[in-house]
Image (tube, rainbow, N blue to C red):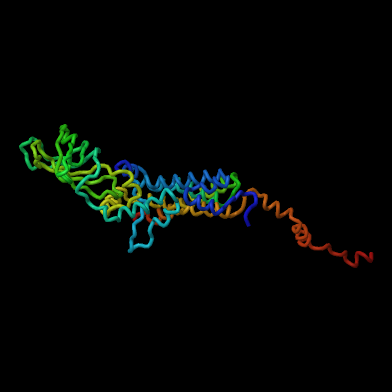
Amino acid sequence: MESFALLADSSHASWYLLPLALTVSLVYSATRFEYPPQILRRSARLFFTILISMGALFAVLFLLSWNL
Amino acid sequence: MLDPRIPFKNRYLAGVLAFLFPGAGHVYQGRYFKGILCGVCVLVTFFYGMALGNWSVVYWKKDPTNFLNPYYAQVFVGLPALPSLVQARRYESRTNINEMSISAPINAPFHGTLRMHDRTVGLADGVVTGRIELKPGARPAEGRVVQGTFTGHLDKKEITIKLGGIPTLGKAVSADPDREIEVDVVDSSDPPQAIGRLRGDFPRSFLDRFESPPDERYYLDLHGKLGKFHELAMTFTMIAGLLNILVILDAVEGPAYGYGDGAEEERKAAAPGSADKAAKAVPPAQPPPAEAAKT
């Protein structure tokens, strides 16, 4: 119990978005196509789309919360 | 229309297998790349979420005040999440209450407090850490009475104390990794007399703990220790379940956008009807103007 609480404390929750975005991209793209190279290409594109979108959202929220 | 290049076999059986174990449906169909990819992604996400939540975020517990139960999403991971239903029945069972006897010997690490009634034996009150050993009473007339010892440390001093009397144990089935126990500290006389009280926790068995519903007290304690990571852990397990819904649909119906190698577009272009369509699309040649013909 203590080790998980310490692990949680030592890292920012936003970093957990990366593996989550990766698995969502891979599984979603795998269910759209059958051809492996196409699956990997589209999942890479989706992964970076998710990261850029979330990054933009974080930037907007950061600016809106400036000096609050 | 199902793509003829994809070996669906019995696609409904593949769907059931995909529900029971992520990726198994695709492996049954011979689609090994997708089976392994989806299986690894879904299972790693699910178990990582469980580990992040101290293995206490996947359980079934009816809450009439909230119809948005996370288990509705988690259940789609299949066999890894289904034990929750069995554990929920065991948790709600009438036999899952605080107990005043032990049915099997206990030999486990222990952490708790010692309170002495009799201070003449040379033991002070304090926090103890060590090992507890208990077994049911030897004589038939003793009924629920236990016998045993505690060996460990009291304020960095090594101690061994005799235990006896009627113990009090917390519920057997719960998500809390520690099970409460209280037992008398006894002297060496016959019959043994209680001279103090040992109260603390020992580890709950895996089968009683895995995917069991948490008590209110443990739930609040866990939420307090993990904070936002409790919600994050629950989110991971729910997303794993929702992703497996897509995997099940892929096993039954195939990929949503087609094979993906561009062969479909080529086939459509090479089809007999496409040449006529191409000819109709080109406008007919215009006749030369009449003046040019006169000259």
Q: Is residue B231 visible?
A: no
Decide if residue B237 is in sight here: yes
Q: Foreground: B148 or B175?
A: B148
Quarter of the picture containing the C terminus of chain B is bottom right
Q: Quadrant of the N terminus of chain B?
A: bottom right
Q: Residue furthest bottom?
A: B290
Q: Residue at x 18, y 38 (%)?
A: B148
Q: Does residue B62 appear left or right of residue A57 in this picture?
A: left
Looking at the image, which is closer to me, B294 or B220? Answer: B220
The total number of labels drawn is 0
Report the residue that reaches farthest toward the top. Answer: B158
Q: Is residue A10 left or right of residue B103?
A: right
Residue B109: x and y in percent read: 24, 38
Q: Quadrant of residue B105?
A: top left
Q: Nearer the viewer, residue B265 or B151?
A: B151
Residue furthest to the right: B295
Q: Residue B247, position in %: x, y?
A: 52, 51
Decide if residue B110 is on the left or right side of residue B42.
left
Q: Residue at x 29, y 50 (%)?
A: B174
- Give coordinates of residue B169: x percent, y percent: 21, 47
The answer to which quarter of the image holds residue B252 is bottom right
For the view shown, which residue lies furthest in the left direction?
B120
Percent across and percent down for residue A25 are 51, 49
